[in-house]
Structure formats: C-alpha cells, structure tokens
Image: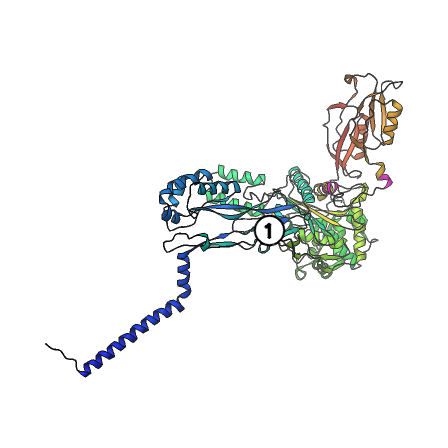
C-alpha cells in the first residue's frame, strides 16, 4: 500500500526528531559535565592510580650530638628490596621461579614466601626485606643486570636506620624511635625537627600496565631532618652512669637510681641518667635483673601469653621512663635547704638562732621524731643543718608560717613543671596552702610530705646557691639544618628571683659547712670547695597502702661545686636501698664524690689545697734500686716518704723495695728498703689486721703496728667515719710495708 505522509505527520516526526536530538545532547552534556567537572578529581585519581605507581623515599633523620659534637644518635642510609608481582607477570612470567630463587638466595628469605607473594599479580610493590646494607644492594643490582631482568621486576628503595653508637649511654634522655617514628625521650620531643620530609618516586605505566622508560618516571628527593646539639657531655654522662650502676649493685636498689648534673647559672643539663637503663638499639630487652626474674617466674608458673605480654609492657614502660623527669619522690632532708633559705630571706631566723632537740617533737599531739633518737641538744642554724635536725626545722617551718612557707614553696618552682625540653615531666604532689595545718607544715618543712621530681629539686637547689635565680633547665643547646646552619639556639631563661644574693651567699656558707664539718663527710674532697645536703625519706605511703611489705627509703644527696662561685649542681637519688644502709649521706654522697673525683678537672675545676691538705696528699713511690742508703733516703724524703732499712747500709745498695716504684701512698708513709744480697725468701712479712668498723685513727694505728701503710678513701678525715671495706682481707700475709686501701663512710644523716 502506498503510504503517503501528510503535512501534519511530517511536522510531528520533525518535532520528535528535534526532541530526541535535544534529549541525547542533554544526556551527553550532562555526562560530560559530571565526568569533567563533578567527578573529575575522582576519575583523575583513578586514572593516575592505573597509570602511575609510586613509593616513598624515607628522609634521613637528623643526627643527635653531645655538646662537643660527639655522635649520640644517627641515621644511616639503608635499602628495602622490592619485587613487583604485576611486572613479573606481564614482562617475564617465565622468570618468576628464577627470580624467587635468586632473591631468596641473596637475602636468606624463604623461597616459598616469595612464590606465594608473586601470585598476587595486582600488586606492584611487595617488600621482600627491609633495611639491607649497600653490599646487599650491589648483589641485587648485579643479579638484575646479569640476567637482563625487567627494571621494575626487582628493585631497591632507599630507607633510613637509626642507631645509637654508645649503646646504653644517655638512653633515658635520648629515647628511641620505631619505624613509624614514634618513641620516647628527645627523639619524641623534637621529632618534628628530626624527622625531615620523605621523598617520592612516581613511575608511569602504559595501557597494559607495563612500566614505561625512565623518561616517564619522576623522583622527588627526601629532605633530611635537622640535627640536635645537646648540652649533655658524653664524658660526664659516662662517669655518672658508671657510678650509679655501682651503687645500684652495691646497695641492691629495688627501684632504680637517677642523677642529674646541671649548670647552676644557665640551667644546661650536662649529664642526666637513670640506672639501670636500656639500650635504644634494642629497647625491648629487659635490663633490670629483678624484672627478668619476674618474667621467668611467670613462665615457670605457666601464665598465659597475654598475661606475660601485659607484664612486659608494664616493665618496658618503666624501663623507658626517665626517672629524673617523670617520677616523683619524697626528698627528705635535702628539702631543708629551701626551708632554711626561705626563713633567712624572711628574717624569721638568723645564723645566731638556736634550736633545742630532745629527739622528738610534739606537734598538736602528733609525735615527730628526729633521725637521732637521742636528740641533738641545742644547735644554732648552721649546726641544725649539719646535724640535719628534724625538730629544729619543724620550728623553722612554724616560724615561717603556712602562708610564707607556701609562698616560697611556689617561688622555688615546686608547684609547677620546670619546662625542661623532655617529654613526660610529672606534676608534683603537695599540701596546698588552703589545706595545710600545723602538722602538715611541720612535716613539709623537713621534706617528708611533699613529692617532687628530681629535675624540680636540682633546679630549685641551683636557685638557692646561684644568687637566687630560678632558671629553666634544658638539654638541647641548638638545632642545625643539613647544611650546618643554626635553626634555633637555646637561651638561659630566668623565671624569677626567689631569694636575694645575700641570702644565697649565706646558704652557700652553710652548705659548705655541712660537707666539711667534723673533718669532712662522704662528699668531702681535698682541695675542692664543695657544698651539699643529704636526705633520707621514708616511703610511708607505700608501706601503709601495702605496696611494700616493709618500710623502704629514698636516699638523696645534692652537691654544689665550687661552692664559693657555683658552676654545677649535682643530685643523686637512690630509690629503695635494701643493703642495710639507708642514709643519703652513706649511699648517694659517695656517688657524688666518685663522679667529682673523675670529672672535676675535666669540667675545668682544679684543686686548691690548703697547707694541711698538701701535707696529707698521696705521693708516688720513686724507684731507688741500685742507690746507696744516702741517695735512696734523699729521693724518698723529696717525695715525702720515710725509709726503713733491712740489712747493712755500709757500702751496700738497694736491691729491693716494698712497696714497689709507682705505688701511690699517703705522704709520710714508710718504704721498706732491702740492702745488699738479701734473698726474696727473707723479705719480712705481716698479717693484715681487720680494720672494718674502726675510725680513721684506729685503722691507721692498727695497720702501722702491723708494719703496713694505709691509703684512705671515702670520708677521708671525718670523725664520724668508720671503715667499711679494706683492699686486702684480714688474716692474709703480705710483704711488710705494703699499702692497704681502706674505705671510710659516715653512716648517718649528717652531711
């Protein structure tokens, strides 16, 4: 049938066609708008993801130096070995097993693990091994080149590895970082400066997912982190840590020890240690023997893995904690220096004030005893400090009153953090002014109620002796970039003037008398002017709460050198000694003395001896073999020694001497000289007496009567000192004239 379109039909068809065109055009435009505008970022990212592969280049972390630019922490460039299962599948599937065998052979990894990883052909980035050295990278590169493998089938990526060349040294200050740059100590506090900015490598692929030539790759280099120059001195740090370790072992400390040496004028920390510490190269190793025994017992008792892991985490948390900054302790009698300074400043006491001690004080019905249960009788202010008399300082605190005591407690910085540039600084615990009654005031006055951090204590002690200025302690001297430019440098910050220079000068004199009283205490050193104060506090709250089965103590000593113009303040805290000794003067003061003996001249502080001190100095025995008696005696006399002859002196020469040349012994000691042909078998012998528990005078007499010489260490001339050890056991037979070293200790709460 011949179908003819009418004019109306043609118009309708035209309208429909126009509508369809408009509709299609609208849909296409809408899709284009959605793709190019609305979804452009998402689609672009998807395209980039399909066309590009990228990986990070780890930035090299900044180096940490001590104040003399010795490396304490550093990062070295290492490499991660990568395979691309996707590239292997597309470019050389026939080499898959060959590649897996070759790489596992070089790296010592499991072949089966690699072949399993290669099954994921959607992956272009599988880490075979992290942090390999340059020689291993060269082996990988040679393997790829020799076998003409695709560049992106096997490759290496730069990484960074942190190391601490001195092991445990300054670990509690330095801290450590893990692979995610999370950690402890300075590493954490200054992480934003140290970490740098990672770089990136972007590789372009073709439509089939194959890596394109180098021209289609981009590399954005990493920016290395800044470096830190600390105020810590590596040598002083070593001296401090070594001697803290000794006291931890000798006195069997149950809760570690800590020490700080701070520049009294600037606040710069030159040494800070916690012992036992840890090795930041292996921070998960448990270093405290008692903790290892605890874990071993848990294993023997068949505790669950979860229970053991929880205990390990608890131990690690404490092990990594910087005791000097993050743990509180009761200071004990060291705090008396602040009570004394405050009372002098307020003029409620003077050097002529007197105090009576019967051994116990009655404060509103509460009995508070003195460490000396027999009492001290009447003391002036200096004597009260030397004797560390609790009732005297209860009276001084009461003379100050709650308001003024609290005012100075705050002024010395005990109610706030010091602001030291280390993480985890703890807040102190103390009785607020509004809650303080006469009993709380009395016990706080001699340091038994308050809990503070060691860093608060040493900072406040500096203010007592440096002219009255409270400074902010710090451990980072400057920050430098990779080109050596100084990014930031530390400045001394004086927070406030706490006491006057006049009061500070008076306190310096009092604290020097504490060390030198009665001929010299455990911190006394011939030729040096040292001030200080000991402290022994009871951990009464731990005992009352049942945390410890018996009452335990904290032994402390704070020393200042030189006391006439203070340069350094040193604080040592020994937590929970279990050796039988408890006093700070007996446990902590010898640590101070040992560090000073090794370090003072290194610190630029040299001895200035009085005539009496010079007369008591040790001398070195000269060699007089082959000399006649006249010449030999002249040599010994010049050295400050005496001679005793065995055999005829008529025309004979010295054929033997005891002690031998090079031996160090006190001036005035006697050297036995054997003249002529006297065989060694005829040398005179002596039996070593037991001098433990004797005074210096008694021990010297006993050894002298046995024909032996004494060498005194420890509390050299203190009238309260008793011998605690001798270098040769009693009962042994030695050559007459031999030197026996005897260590003396003042075992009470006096300085």
- From the top left corner, tell me how far across and down residue 234 is, in percent: 67, 45
Mark 1 sits on what residue? 62
Tell me, yes or no, if residue 569 can be seen here: yes
Q: Quadrant of the N terminus?
A: bottom left
The vertical placement of 70 against 726, above or below, is below
Q: Judge left or right: residue 197 versus residue 555.
A: left
Of residues 78 and 509, the one nearer the viewer is 78
Q: How is the image coloured?
A: rainbow
**In the image, is residue 88 part of the stretch drawn in magenta?**
no
Q: Judge left or right: residue 639 versus residue 54.
A: right
Tell me, yes or no, if residue 366 can be seen here: no
Tell how many labels: 1
Region in magenta: 595-612
* Point 46% across, 52% down: residue: 214
* Point 85% across, 28% down: residue: 636
Majority SS type along the magenta span: loop
- From the top left corner, tell me how far across and down residue 290 is, in percent: 58, 39
């Amino acid at each position: 049938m011949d179908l003819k379109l009418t004019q109306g039909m043609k118009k309708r068809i035209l309208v429909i066609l126009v509508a369809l065109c408009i509709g299609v055009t609208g849909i296409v435009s809408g899709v284009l708008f959605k793709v190019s505008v609305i979804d452009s970022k998402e689609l672009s990212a998807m395209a980039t993801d399909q066309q590009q592969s990228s990986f990070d280049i780890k930035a090299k972390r900044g180096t940490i130096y001590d104040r003399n630019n010795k490396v304490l922490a550093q990062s070295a460039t290492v490499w991660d070995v990568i395979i691309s299962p996707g590239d292997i599948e597309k470019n050389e599937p026939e080499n898959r097993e060959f590649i897996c065998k070759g790489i596992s052979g070089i790296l010592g990894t499991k072949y089966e693990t690699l072949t399993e990883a290669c099954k994921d052909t959607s992956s272009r980035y599988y880490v075979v091994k992290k942090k390999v050295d340059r020689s291993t990278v060269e082996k990988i590169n040679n393997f790829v080149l020799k076998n003409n493998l695709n560049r992106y089938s096997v490759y290496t990526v730069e990484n960074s590895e942190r190391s601490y060349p001195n092991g445990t040294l300054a670990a509690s200050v330095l801290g450590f970082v893990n692979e995610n740059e999370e950690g402890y100590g300075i590493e954490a506090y200054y992480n934003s400066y140290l970490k740098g900015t990672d770089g990136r490598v972007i590789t372009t692929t073709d439509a089939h997912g194959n890596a394109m030539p180098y021209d289609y790759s981009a590399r954005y280099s990493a920016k290395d982190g800044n470096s830190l120059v600390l105020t810590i001195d590596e040598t002083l740090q070593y001296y401090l840590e070594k001697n803290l370790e000794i006291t931890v072992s000798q006195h069997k400390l149950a809760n570690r020890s800590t020490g700080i040496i701070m520049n009294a004028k600037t606040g710069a920390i030159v040494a800070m240690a916690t012992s036992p510490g840890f090795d930041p190269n292996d921070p998960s190793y448990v270093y405290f023997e008692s903790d290892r025994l605890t874990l071993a017992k848990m294993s023997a008792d068949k505790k669950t893995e979860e229970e053991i892991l929880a205990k390990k985490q608890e131990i690690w948390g404490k092990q990594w904690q910087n005791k000097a900054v993050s743990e509180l302790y009761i200071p004990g009698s060291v705090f008396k220096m602040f009570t004394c300074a405050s009372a002098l400043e307020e003029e409620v006491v003077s050097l002529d004030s007197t105090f009576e001690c019967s051994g116990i004080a009655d404060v509103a019905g509460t009995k508070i005893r003195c460490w000396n249960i027999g009492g001290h009788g009447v003391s002036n202010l200096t004597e009260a400090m030397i004797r560390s008399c609790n009732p005297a300082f209860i009276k001084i605190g009461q003379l100050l009153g709650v308001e003024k005591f609290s005012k100075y407690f705050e002024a010395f910085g005990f109610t706030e953090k010091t602001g030291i540039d280390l993480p985890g600084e703890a807040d102190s615990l103390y009785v607020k002014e509004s809650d303080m009654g006469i009993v709380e005031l009395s016990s706080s006055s001699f340091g038994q109620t308050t809990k503070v951090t060691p860093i608060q204590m040493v900072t406040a002690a500096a203010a007592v002796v440096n002219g009255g200025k409270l400074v902010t302690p710090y451990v980072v001297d400057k920050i430098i970039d990779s080109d050596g430019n100084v990014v930031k440098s530390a400045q001394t910050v004086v927070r406030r003037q706490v006491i006057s220079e006049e009061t500070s000068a008076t306190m310096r004199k009092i604290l020097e008398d504490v060390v030198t009283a009665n001929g010299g205490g455990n911190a006394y050193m011939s030729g040096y002017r040292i001030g200080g104060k000991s402290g022994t506090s009871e951990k009464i709250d731990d005992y009352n709460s049942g945390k410890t089965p018996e009452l335990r103590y904290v032994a402390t000593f704070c020393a200042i050198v030189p006391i006439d113009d203070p340069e350094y303040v040193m604080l040592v805290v020994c937590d929970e000694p279990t050796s039988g000794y408890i006093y700070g003067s007996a446990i902590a003061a010898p640590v101070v003395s040992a560090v000073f003996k090794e370090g003072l001249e290194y610190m630029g502080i040299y001895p200035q001896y009085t005539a009496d001190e010079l007369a008591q100095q040790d001398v070195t025995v000269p060699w007089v073999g082959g000399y006649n008696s006249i010449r030999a005696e002249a040599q010994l006399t010049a050295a400050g020694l005496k001679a005793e002859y065995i055999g005829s002196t008529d025309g004979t020469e010295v054929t033997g001497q005891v002690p031998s040349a090079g031996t160090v012994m006190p001036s005035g000691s006697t050297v036995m000289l054997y003249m002529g042909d006297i065989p060694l078998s005829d040398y005179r012998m002596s039996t070593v007496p037991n001098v433990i528990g004797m005074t210096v005078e008694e021990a010297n007499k006993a050894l002298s009567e046995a024909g032996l010489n004494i060498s005194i260490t420890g509390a050299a001339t203190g009238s309260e000192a008793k011998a605690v050890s001798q270098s040769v056991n009693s009962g042994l037979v030695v050559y007459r004239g031999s030197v026996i070293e005897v260590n003396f200790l003042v075992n009470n709460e006096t300085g």
